[in-house]
């Protein structure tokens, strides 16, 4: 079972992974959903001080998980530029960690309206399914992204930060600044951070890319990102009505 635990994807035999929305993938999704629900129920019952400590604990856990992944990659000789945490979810780790210890409007807005849907999308269309179930990259992928979804949900139900539509410029400014920089890095290093150069394998954007080419894909991708961010404001309001004891 553990024979392939430290094996990198390039050294794995063909068909080592599993299918998107197959039995294993769906089992992970159900398990993560149940774990998040239990955490939300328990989180609501503890004091604000205990909630703060729990969020900081999650932040430290995220840093530890990422450090573990990077260490294994270095020790096994597979650390490459493309493995740096420069995808949206990699950046989300540091955004959420900073918010846990130094909360402010920019970090809160980005955590709730960008990190949350980004991590949820990664869970639905993961690019680590080429690994077998018992592999550190597969385990890291599901556990880390599950925490990245859990963290903003706990922030929202506790009211520690509530996004406001008038602050939509905050995540948009971030993407406007980060996207050109990462696109340039992708071009020079042959990477695909934030999927700016090509769609993630198995994602719905693959069909657009193959049918209409890169330009249409990038425009469509950008439009969907904006639409998701916009929709998050309405979705967050509904979420808080369901789970929060006190309405704003």
Image (cartoon, rainbow, N blue to C red):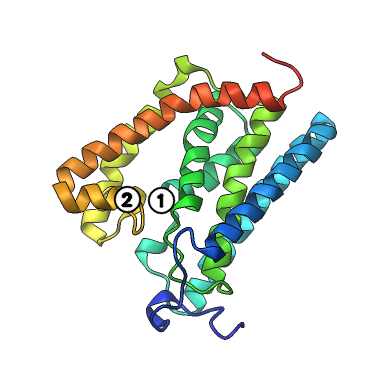
- Residue 115 tag number: none
Count the marks.
2
Tell whether 113 sits left or right of 86.
right
> Dot 2: what SS?
helix
| 75 w.r.t. 140: above or below | below
Tell whether 243 sits left or right of 19.
right
For the point 68% across and 35% down, which residue is it? 154
The picture places residue 231, in percent across and down from the top left corner, at 45, 26
Q: Which residue is mark 2?
A: 195
Mark 2 and 1 residues: CB-CB less than 8 Å, in contact? Answer: yes
The picture places residue 166, in percent across and down from the top left corner, at 46, 14
Inter-mark Cα distance, 2 to 1: 8 Å
Q: Judge depth for marks 2 and 1 and give the one in front.
A: 2
Q: Which residue is mark 1?
A: 87
- Quadrant location of the C terminus in the rendered image: top right
For the point 43% across and 53% down, which residue is it? 125
- Precedes in sequence: disc 2 or disc 1: 1
- Residue 90 in view, yes or no: no
Viewer-nearest residue: 21 or 57: 21
> Dot 1: what SS?
loop
- Quadrant location of the N terminus in the rendered image: bottom right
């Amino acid at each position: 079972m553990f024979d392939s635990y430290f094996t990198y994807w390039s050294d794995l035999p063909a068909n080592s992974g599993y299918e998107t929305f197959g039995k294993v993938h769906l089992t992970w999704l159900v398990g993560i959903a149940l774990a998040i629900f239990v955490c939300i129920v328990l989180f609501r019952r503890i004091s604000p001080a205990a909630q703060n400590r729990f969020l900081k604990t999650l932040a430290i856990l995220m840093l530890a998980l990422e450090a573990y992944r990077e260490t294994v990659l270095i020790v096994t000789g597979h650390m490459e530029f493309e493995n740096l945490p420069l995808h949206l979810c990699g950046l989300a780790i540091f955004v959420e960690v900073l918010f846990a210890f130094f909360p402010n409007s920019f970090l809160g807005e980005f955590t709730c309206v960008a990190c949350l849907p980004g991590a949820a999308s990664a869970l639905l269309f993961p690019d680590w399914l080429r690994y077998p179930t018992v592999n550190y990259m597969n385990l890291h992928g599901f556990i880390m992204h599950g925490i990245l979804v859990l963290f903003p949900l706990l922030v929202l139900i506790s009211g520690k930060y509530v996004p406001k539509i008038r602050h939509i410029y905050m995540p948009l400014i971030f993407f406007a600044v980060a996207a050109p920089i990462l696109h340039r890095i992708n071009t020079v290093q042959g990477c695909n951070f934030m999927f700016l150069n090509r769609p993630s394998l198995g994602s719905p954007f693959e069909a657009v890319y193959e049918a209409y080419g890169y330009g249409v894909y990038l425009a469509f991708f950008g439009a969907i990102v904006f639409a998701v961010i916009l929709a998050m404001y309405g979705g967050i309001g509904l979420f808080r009505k369901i789970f929060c004891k006190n309405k704003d």
